[in-house]
Amino acid sequence: MATSNSFLNTPTKTPSEKSASMSRKHQNPNSFEYSSTRSSSNSEFKSRFEAYNRLQAAAVAFGEKLPIPEIVAIGGQSDGKSSLLEALLGFRFNVREVEMGTRRPLILQMIHDPIALEPRCRFQEEDSEEYGAPVVLASAIADIIKSRTEALLKKIKTAVSSKPIVMRAEYAHCPNLTIIDTPGFVLKAKKGEPESTPEEILSMVKSLASPPHRILLFLQQSSVEWCSSLWLDAIREIDSTFRRTVIVVSKFDNRLKEFSDRWEVDRYLSASGYLGDNTCPFFVALPKDRTTVSNDEFRRQISHVDSEVLRYLREGVKGGFDEEKFKSYIGFGCLRDYLESELQKRYKEAAPATLALLEQRCSEVTFELVRMDSKIQATSDIAHLRRSAMLYTASISNHVGALIDGAADPPPEQWGKTTVEEQSESGNGVWPGVIADIKPPNATLRLYGGAAFERVMHEFRCAAYSIECPPVSREKVANILLAHAGRGGGRGIAEAAAEIARAAARSWLAPLLDTACDRLAFVLGNLFDLSLERNQSHDSEYESKTGNMDGYVGFHAALRCAYIRFIKDLAKHCKQLVRHHLDSVTSPYSQVCYDNDFQVGLGLCATSFNKLNQASAGSFCLELSEGRIASRDETMGEQENIPPERNAQQTTPGKAAEAREALRESQMTIPETPSPDQPCEAVYGGAKKEHGNCIDIGPRKRISRMTGNSRNSDHIRVQNGGGHLFGNGDCGLRSGSAYSDICLSASQHFARIREVLVERGVTSTLNSGFLTPCRDRLVMALGLDLFAVNDDKFMDMFVAPGAIDVLQNERESLKKRQKILQSCLNEFKSVARAL
């Protein structure tokens, strides 16, 4: 039995798959010729590997997205990833004690250094491409990983993070290999973690494994059957054909005792029917003894386990196994050599594309650095700054106008807002006084600019028309009506109803107008960020004339404040304009409530309406309480000065004068009380128009007979509840109540005021008050606010405390990035020449 002792020597380049097993079997690792060849091969690979490692460090530090070939280790939390990493490193550092990488990725850059007899490990500083001092004690590595993970998670207040920890390990007994250790899949969150932790880990691992330039190293315990694998389906979602996936069956020694015949072993090793014909997994077993041992002893144990696994398959299984087909896939040594060979092959294939990409990135960074230098230099050129700032402001203003006129970029799906989002973010979630749920058309679409403005206008109309004239108490009606009746003039009821409608309109419509102005101001305020985005993504007509203003934080803050002030001033002015319209239509001098076309349109006969007003002109005793018809006893008790109906029988003898007066009153012709089922002639007199006579004669005769005794006339009106004066009108109410008639008339007046206000005044005012200034006066207003100042005040926007420091820091960062990328480019040029 051949026992491999390759762990005690420098790793070698792996031969082809067909000859890998036989090559390892016949090569003598101790021969001078083999060592010389291997050293030359490793030298070429090491230079390429070092170049990629430096590039990877720069990519992590500066957030560069470079297609660097990398190996990503994936598996469940207890599937042996940590043990495999320790075996690849060639030494233990108690990584399993702290569950290394379970909540944050770890990039392990393993560098084979023949003179490093003890491992030298260094961690890359957070947010920097620099590496810290070497870690002397291997046990301290686990502590650093744990402390860095906990510090970051506490800072960002999450259970997992995709920001990696980078560790560089230089050792004589590790291969040239870079592996990204990912958090292990879990089914349930640990105690104290959010319930969503398993889903977050799965999502993060998929994101890390998705780039096509990465090799997936998927580990699964041998005790798990392929048909019941929990995480194999997740791997299929990332790499459906396993074209870039290396599958490793860990803890293979736990499965060996189940094999007794050759066909059982061969069927299991082939994974037939589950992984496809072109996919063959590796089978690895590692030492289970976790006692503290030396690094040499640890590597010896790994080699011994590989030998024992092969010995059992050859001697413990009847007929052995198909060594020609499967031997190169059994044991940790085979896996290590394959990974190093595969990564070397990927590096070589990716070198030309990486070189071209590096040249492109170096050119871009150089251009950014030149532009930053010009910005810093421009801070001392006031004339240049004024010109650039003015052109930039004009560009932003033009974009605002384009968005109002109907531009559809940037994408509305990303930048637009629904009606619910507008209501929530603007702080005006409801329309004052509106109970109904207002849903304008297109409420669920994400709109901005002119489209969102029109949607809010339509929403305002819907809200306004959903408000009706609110109920009015009888006391309020009585106070208003009786006061108007006392003034005379013949329009008491109409004036009272109009006054009620005007008061309701001022009370209920004014808050709606303020809310509409606030909502429209919010829509226009959002256009500033949209204009910035549009200015960055479009080739503006000003771009060739002005420099980029992105670095001037103070100027951008001042520009934003000036725009917000402009929109607020527009909103304030529009509120004043629409309030003026409201005051106009609710003024006592406004004729909105007395238009003849309005009265006829609502079904009120002008003749009967005027008669009601004339009849009420001299009335001071109108009954408006709920009990319209007073009982006889109540009338006698409350109206002592009004003679009773049958005074002839109750007259005291000797009082002839009073008797004669009573006789005259008793001989008066009392008009018939109209039946509740019949319309009152006082109002329906106009119905005689069908006979060609529009003069209401009957009621006038009756009124003339009633004018002989005003007290009796008042008494009759009281007993009839005002039915004679305020009888049924054309509106269909048969109550004959003055209160009902006035409420109905007030409601009609309110509707007329609302219609005139919304359709004739407010709509056009809001359009001209908001949109026209944004199109025509925005650039002038911003220019006066920002540039109509002396040079010292103008320069405060560019040399404010910290502004120059920000530009200088950004410049230093660009210079550092340029230096690193240029160094990587030079190294890759050397690698390309060697290839």
Image (spheres, helix red, strand yellow):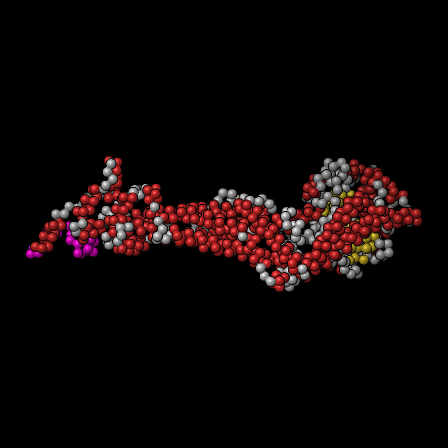
Could you tell me if residue 217 is visible in this image? no
Q: Residue furthest left?
A: 654
Location of the C terminus (image quadrant) = top right
* Residue that appears at 29% across and 42% down: 605
As for residue 643 lying within the magenta part, the answer is yes
Identify the residue at horizontal 51%, vertical 47% (top origin): 453
Of all residues, the one furthest to the front in this rendering is: 383
In the rendered image, residue 118, in percent from the top left (x then y), is placed at 83, 57
186 or 35, which lies in front? 35
Residue 735, image x, y percentages: 28, 45
Left or right placement of residue 802 versus residue 316 in this view: left
**Residue at image location 63% in from the left, 55% down from the top:** 387
**Outermost residue toward the right?**
32
Q: Residue 107: x percent and y percent?
A: 74, 52
Q: Is residue 278 magenta?
A: no
Of the pair 119 and 773, the residue shown nearer to us: 773
Instruction: Pick the quarter of the image with the N terminus.
Output: top right
Q: Is residue 42 above or below residue 554?
A: above
Is residue 278 in sight in this rendering?
yes
Q: Where is residue 14 drawn, in percent x and y? A: 84, 44
User: Viewer-proximal residue, 283 or 368?
Assistant: 368
- Magenta residues span 634-655
Decide which of 45, 603 is in the foreground and name it.
603
Q: Please count the marks in the image.
A: 0
Report the residue at 75% width, 48% height from top.
360
